[in-house]
């Protein structure tokens, strides 16, 4: 399951038999959203989660960030079980960065303050050090001129890039990206994906949910196809996207790939 | 947009349109003026021609008595202003503290949370005038050592107690209106619950509740007059004092004008802030 390039490294993230249910609002009982999901992520891996809407991609990412409690299974991060209720989620999240589909920037703070809040308040960086780091990353991602603006003055693509920088400012060991281009106009998708491509090339470990199949084929070291809360097929992108074995994977790819 | 700004001349059609527009504008101004004058004239005539008008004018609108009573009412009004200025910041602090207590998640704070709910429920159920009586007459009657017995002190406390319950609810609605996705991203950045409140939720909530808060303060300014009923020499008490002595009610009108002079600017400020907020939220929705 580990990427062929890094077979000897211990996994950064290990997910075993995770189950997640939500209460049904109309009838008794619970609906299963993640069913027996297992996944291994080694340092430097870029894992792409694909699957139709409602297949559980966002839910899986939220469970990994401990934003949702799981109903069964084990999640290990950096060799420690983080699904243990005795583990403080805040300690875990210090090393995990998460970017949401709808950016979720803080509207009352400037771009710079959005990016320095967690480094200052959580990671104990001095204001000057946090500012320098944010300036450097914002500059690298073409946002230097927007540093002092408020998020509502930026385009969607710029806001999503700021959200990426905000997550990167704390130097996370693992980056979780939830369909970060889904809310963007087609011509803005490229500028955000370029950043992710750069991060992948720099060796950043990422788990990302995406609808961009060509992008997944290009950057992923590993692709998981989710359907109805289960990982139906997984493997290197060339195999899952190029020569899928499962009929459900083929049906999904026929629907999303134009050719 | 097209063509340079220098060689553009309005077309014949545009000039005609402008003439029509200014004619329409003049027409609207004339209609509005005439309508206002007619309505005010009818109301004024109904008042002045009513059989009791001479008596009313003599007892409520007497210039001599207005001048005579002005200095004492002004003195009394200064007490209202002082009480308002002291109570307002205390109410803001107490209200925000109550609202935050109700939002707290820590198990240690469970008893405080219950008390905060009880406090807002009970206090909002008691008429403010009754609270003033309870504090002004009840607290000194306890005879406890070191407790101030000043009426001004306890009347101010009563207003703070009463209004902080309302203001707490205003703050709470603001806090609850902050979208859960904001909490999720603060959580994902590993901020603690307290840091999330302090840096993410409360700043956004406060911005949203400024108009309803100002509304409560307009109401507080008027309610400082309740202290007249416990014998504090405020604007209303001064007016009543003068009126009863001289058998003339003009001082009441003078006192009312003072309160209007204080509340109208605040009410206009409410409007301006509410409008600006609405515009900003619309801009965000685009
Ligand atoms: N808070 C919740 N309460 C109840 N059901 C939920 C909740 N969140 C998600 N679900 C359900 O869980 C299922 C998986 O949702 P999820 O958001 O993970 O899908 P997804 O794969 O991310 O879809 P999309 O591609 O549309 O983002 C959906 O059927 C959804 O209705
Ligand atoms: Mg999703």
Image (cartoon, rainbow, N blue to C red):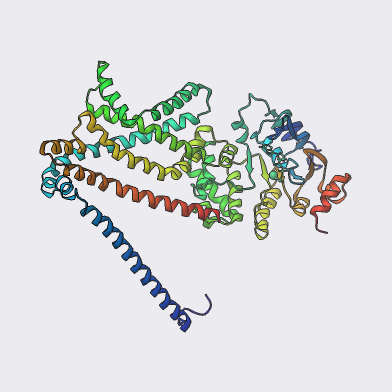
| Residue B11 visible in rendering | no
Q: Position of residue B50 (x, y in %)?
A: 22, 51
- B243 left or right, relative to A111: left
Q: Residue at x 67, y 45 (%)?
A: A177
Q: Quick check: can you spot residue B128?
A: yes
- The vertical placement of B92 against A53, above or below, is above
Q: Classify A151 as above or below A73.
A: below
- Give the side of residue B144 with respect to residue A150, left or right: left
Residue A238 on image: x %, y %: 84, 50
Q: Is B27 placed above or below B152 here?
A: below
Q: Residue furthest front?
A: B51
Residue in the foreground of this view, choosing between A44 and B12: B12
Q: Residue at x 24, y 22 (%)?
A: B148
Quarter placement of the C terminus of chain B: bottom right
Counting from the top left corner in percent of width and height, residue A203 is at 70, 45
**For residue A159, side relative to residue B99 (left or right):** right
Residue at (50, 22) in percent of width and height = B110
Q: State the residue in front, A256 or A97.
A: A256
Task: Kindly identify the residue that appears in the image at 85 percent across and 45 percent down.
Answer: A248
State which quadrant residue B137 falls in.
Answer: top left
Query: Which residue is nearer to you in this view: A27 or B118?
Result: A27
In x, y percent, where is residue B87? 30, 35
Q: Ligand 1 appears in which quadrant?
A: top right
Q: Is residue A109 left or right of residue B262?
A: right
Report the number of numbered marks. 0
């Amino acid at each position: 399951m580990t990427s062929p390039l890094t077979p000897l490294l211990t996994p950064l993230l290990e997910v075993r038999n995770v189950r997640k249910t939500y209460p049904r609002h109309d009838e008794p009982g619970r609906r299963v959203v993640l069913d027996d999901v297992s996944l291994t992520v080694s340092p430097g891996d870029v894992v792409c989660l694909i699957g139709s809407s409602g297949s559980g991609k966002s839910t899986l990412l939220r469970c990994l960030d401990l934003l949702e409690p799981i109903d069964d299974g084990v999640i290990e991060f950096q060799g420690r079980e983080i699904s243990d209720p005795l583990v403080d989620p805040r300690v875990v999240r210090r090393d995990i960065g998460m970017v949401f589909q709808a950016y979720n920037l803080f509207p009352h703070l400037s771009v710079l303050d959005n990016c320095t809040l967690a480094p200052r308040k959580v990671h104990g960086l001095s204001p000057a050090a946090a500012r320098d780091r944010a300036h450097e990353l914002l500059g690298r991602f073409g946002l230097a001129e927007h540093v002092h603006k408020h998020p509502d003055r930026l385009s969607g693509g710029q806001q999503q890039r700021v959200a990426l920088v905000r997550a990167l400012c704390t130097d996370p060991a693992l980056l979780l990206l939830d369909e970060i281009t889904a809310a963007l106009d087609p011509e803005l998708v490229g500028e955000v994906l370029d950043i992710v491509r750069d991060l992948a090339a720099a060796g950043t470990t990422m788990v990302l949910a995406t609808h961009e199949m060509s992008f997944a084929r290009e950057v992923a070291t590993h692709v998981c196809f989710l359907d109805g809360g289960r990982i139906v097929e997984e493997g290197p992108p060339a195999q899952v996207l190029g020569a899928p074995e499962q009929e459900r994977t083929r049906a999904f790819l026929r629907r999303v790939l134009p050719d | 947009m097209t063509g340079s700004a220098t060689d553009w001349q309005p077309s014949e059609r545009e000039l005609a349109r402008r003439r029509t527009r200014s004619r329409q504008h003049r027409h609207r101004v004339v209609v509005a003026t005439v309508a206002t004058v007619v309505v005010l004239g009818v109301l004024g005539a109904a008042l002045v021609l009513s059989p009791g008008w001479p008596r009313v004018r003599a007892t409520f609108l007497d210039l001599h008595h207005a001048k005579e009573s002005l200095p004492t009412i002004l003195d009394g009004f200064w007490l209202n202003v002082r009480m308002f200025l002291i109570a307002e910041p205390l109410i803001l602090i107490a209200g925000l503290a109550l609202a935050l207590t109700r939002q707290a998640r820590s198990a240690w704070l469970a008893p405080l949370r219950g008390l905060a709910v009880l406090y807002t429920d009970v206090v909002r159920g008691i008429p403010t005038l009754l609270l003033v009586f309870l504090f002004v007459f009840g607290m000194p009657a306890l005879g406890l050592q070191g407790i101030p017995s000043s009426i001004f002190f306890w009347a101010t406390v009563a207003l703070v107690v009463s209004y902080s319950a309302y203001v707490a609810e205003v703050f709470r609605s603001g806090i609850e209106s902050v979208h859960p996705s904001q909490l999720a991203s603060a959580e994902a950045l590993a901020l603690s619950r307290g840091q999330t409140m302090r840096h993410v939720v409360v700043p956004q909530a406060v911005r949203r509740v400024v108009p309803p808060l100002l509304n409560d303060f307009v109401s507080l300014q008027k309610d400082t007059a309740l202290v007249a009923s416990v014998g504090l020499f405020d604007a209303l008490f001064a007016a009543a004092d003068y009126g009863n002595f001289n058998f003339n009610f003009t001082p009441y009108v003078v006192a009312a004008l003072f309160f209007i002079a204080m509340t109208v600017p605040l009410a206009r400020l409410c409007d301006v802030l509410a409008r600006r907020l609405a515009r900003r939220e619309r801009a965000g929705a685009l």
